[in-house]
Image (spheres, helix red, strand yellow):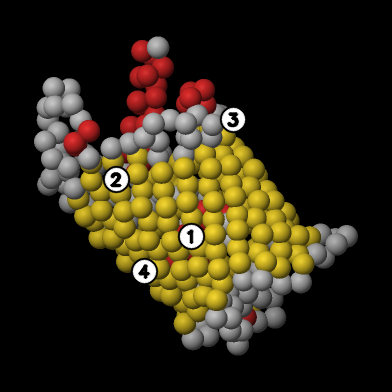
Amino acid sequence: MKNILKIIVSLVMVNSYAQELTIPTFTQYLGDNPYVVSPAYAGIGDNIKIRLNGLTQWVGMKNAPDNQSLAVDARLGQRSGIGGFLYNDKNGNTFQKGGKISFAHHLILDYYENRYVSFGMSFVMNQFYIDVTQFDPSYDPIVTNNRDLNNYNIDLGFLYRQQGFYFAANVSNLLDKDTDKFLIKEPNILRNFSAYTGYKIKSSNNSDIEYEPSVFYQLYQSDKRSSTDVNLKVRFMDYEDYYWAGISYRFLNDQLFQPLNIGPMAGLKKNNFYFAYSYQYTTNALSAFNSGTHMVTLGYDIFQGLSNCPCTSNEID
């Protein structure tokens, strides 16, 4: 029993370490909301897109990670876009909240081959703190305050699109952080790199069916941790509405055949309303103590206005 508890504590601490001053990235982007992983996506589409996301991780475990976020992006003029993102994240006795505001610009490389390139930048603010009121003073004597810390940073994004293909490369937390309030061993490098790529393939037998395989890669510079999501979505078009289903597989890159999470997902867009649900089964030692991770995305598209530039037209063909 003691060994099991040690494993659980270790896993929670690893997740907490990853949480600090970094906007948590789960699979929100698969809910037709790629702006959350790259500011270069801001403004692509015919509407102001609003996406509200709620995630509860490791359901059944006390003080398990919990996250809520709100993303909004819209076209600005014909070739630019703006976006905003707010989030609240809880992991045991550690708390983090913050957000970002973004600007993106979109250019046409080739009008006839539908080749576009986009550049985006975000100003980011994160606040991190620890609730020490739940600590035992005799067990944690050196923790005497909430260790609160604010960090202001910059994200950069690049996006290339051609026909159904897309590739986004991003740098998050470009600037180092101040470590004066913490122990000298604490890393001050928050930078992480990510790449998101995929292809939308029309069915040869039915043009109303679209397949979308995609890959999302993340690398944390501070300790060289990296992970990859391998995803597949199938979209069923119904005029301007659509329904989709898929599966996501996440693993550490040094443990290819030992997935962190794997699970199904599904969603729909009806008129201007959007709904998506994702379930992730945890395959590590915590699987015996929880029923998995559940995520729900609610969205609404408002103020439709068709773009005069194909570089910002509706991304759902």
For mark 4, does the 10 Å Cα neighbourhood hold few (<14), some (14 to 19), or many (20 or more) residues? many
Residue 101 numbered mark, or none: 4
* Nearer-the-camera pick, 83 or 93: 93
Alpha carbon distance from label 2 to label 1: 19 Å
Of the residues tagged 4 and 3, which is closer to the observer? 4
Question: Is 132 on the left-hand or right-hand side of 235?
Answer: left
Q: Position of residue 265 (x, y in %)?
A: 63, 47
**Label 3 near label 2: C-beta < 8 Å?**
no
Tell me the tag on residue 257.
Answer: 3
Distance from the alpha carbon under mark 3 to that under mark 1: 32 Å
Q: Earlier in the sequence, mark 4 or mark 1?
A: 1
Residue 157 visible to an observer of this rendering: no
Pick whichever of labels 4 and 3 is earlier in the sequence.
4
Secondary element at tag 2 = strand
Amino acid type indicated by mark 2: Phe
Depth check, mark 4 against mark 2: the one in front is 2
Please state which amino acid type lies under the numbered disc 3. Phe
Q: Nearer the viewer, residue 162 or 285?
A: 285
Q: Who's the residue at 80% across and 64% down the image?
A: 208
Q: Are marks 3 and 1 in contact (CB under 8 Å)?
A: no
Camera-side mark, 4 or 1? 1
Q: Amino acid at mark 4?
A: Ile
User: Which residue carries the number 2 mark?
Assistant: 95
